[in-house]
Image (tube, rainbow, N blue to C red):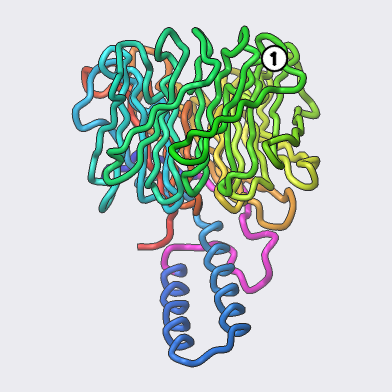
Amino acid sequence: MEKIGQYTPTSDVNDEWDETVPTRFRSGWFNAVQRELVAVVEKVFKKTLNVADDEQIATSLKSRFEAIARSMPFDAANGVEMNAAVGAANDTYGRGVAVSADGSVIVVGADGATSNTGKVYVYSGQDWATETILTASDGAVGDRFGKSVAISADGSVIVVGSYDDDTSRGAVYVYSGSSWATQTRLTAIDGASNHAFGYSVAVSNDGTTVAVGAYGHNSSEGAAYIFNGANWATQTQILASDGLASDNFGYSIAISGDGLVLVVGARADNTAQGAAYVYSGSSWATQTKLTASNGASNHYFGRCVDTNYDGSVVAVGLYTSTVSNVYIFCGENWAAEKILTPSDTLPATVSFGYSVALSDDGRDLLVTAFGDKLDLGVSMGSLYYFTNYGNGNLWKEHSKFYSDRVNTDTVVIDNYGDALALSGNGLVAVVGAWRRDVGANTDQGAAFRFEKLLGA
């Protein structure tokens, strides 16, 4: 396999662990521990255990494995560049990406395909070798189907946004059933031109709750919508209580895995300082507004948002080259704020925090640095991997990695990192690069897949 990346450890990842943990986890050592754990499990479960013993052993093994996995880097050197089997110039493959909880199903949107009608590619099976192409049954030129995508934990439900459909009213398509053959089209009950319904989408782990952002609603004040029930027939509209024109509420959206917490980004709130709103409770009635403690105009805080399985951790990124911050909120009413910054100094043109992605347990975080040159003389983009080693907001930068394929585009950047996804178990990362040239095809686009180094 061709090597396409580089991994650089940026901190002592084990400095908060006890003395029984080696100073570095290597693949060989991990394999030995893995074999040992398997032997223990086989031996233990041949015996009759009471419930307390069973739960204690299971909890101990699970905790140990998670600790090992969290300390391993992503295998950037053996990352894989993904392309459409049959692509074309201006497909913008990689505009949207999503991955199932166990990393076994990957979704890539190509909203520029077929004169901006759009396509979505689904990869499954052994080594993601099976490619399934999804299209809208009523698709038309200019719909931008595939700009946003989301997937349920088991990969059985796929949600696709088509925000430019019908003079930018927008639509969302939900696919389910065998090979995702069942298609349901969702629209806003109050939809109108330029609402951009479907610019952002999210889905709960069980695939029964769909969240949709429409940042152009009401003179770009923005709105969010929740769909659930049989065939997603129940629709709830959510508005910011203090919303104003041009706030862009709904530009980004995330829903917790359990479907009980909703996070909506309003990147242009308050002279583009930006905000993120968290909703919970019955009918999403409880609203908490999050802002950056060091925010300023034109930071676009809320450009991207994510949350974990139970909604206890919220990550918010921004779009500015003047600061390099990502914000983590947790605790009672998400009141505890942790500001994450890169360990290295980035050029002034780089936007750290352009995209963010959390694991289900809320202890793994990926952050893109959009336009990072990495001393290669080209603007490729990079990924930072942060981990939370303890209870609370004890985050540390683990490593930095990126694709080092030579950028031969006629444009300056590949838009690497514009889209980002992390599997729920934190072991598989997918990064979109929708302006990447493939052969002679300008802006055909690509996606990059990285896996954790868990041993051979």
Q: Is residue 352 left or right of residue 207?
A: right
For residue 180, what is the image quadrant? Answer: top left
Above or below residue 404? Residue 143 is above
Give the residue drawn at x 67%, y 30%: 325
Q: Nearer the viewer, residue 288 or 331?
A: 288
For residue 85, what is the image quadrant? Answer: top left
In percent of width and height, residue 117 lies at: 31, 16
Give the residue drawn at x 60%, y 30%: 236
Q: Is residue 399 magenta?
A: no
Above or below residue 112? Residue 317 is below
Q: Is residue 9 left or right of residue 333?
A: left
In percent of width and height, residue 35 lies at: 41, 76
Q: Residues within 10 Å of mark 1 (few under 14, many from 20)?
A: many
Given the current orientation, which residue lies at the most extreme bottom position? 47
Q: Main secondary structure of the magenta part?
A: loop
Q: Secondary structure at mark 1?
A: helix
The C terminus, quarter of image: bottom left
Give the residue drawn at x 62%, y 17%: 222
For residue 216, what is the image quadrant? Answer: top right
In percent of width and height, residue 25 lies at: 51, 63
Give the residue drawn at x 46%, y 41%: 230
The magenta region covers: 8-28
Q: Is residue 15 magenta?
A: yes
In percent of width and height, residue 415 lies at: 44, 22
Q: Nearer the viewer, residue 172 or 313?
A: 172
The residue at which mark 1 appears reads as: 272
Amino acid type shown at disc 1: Ala
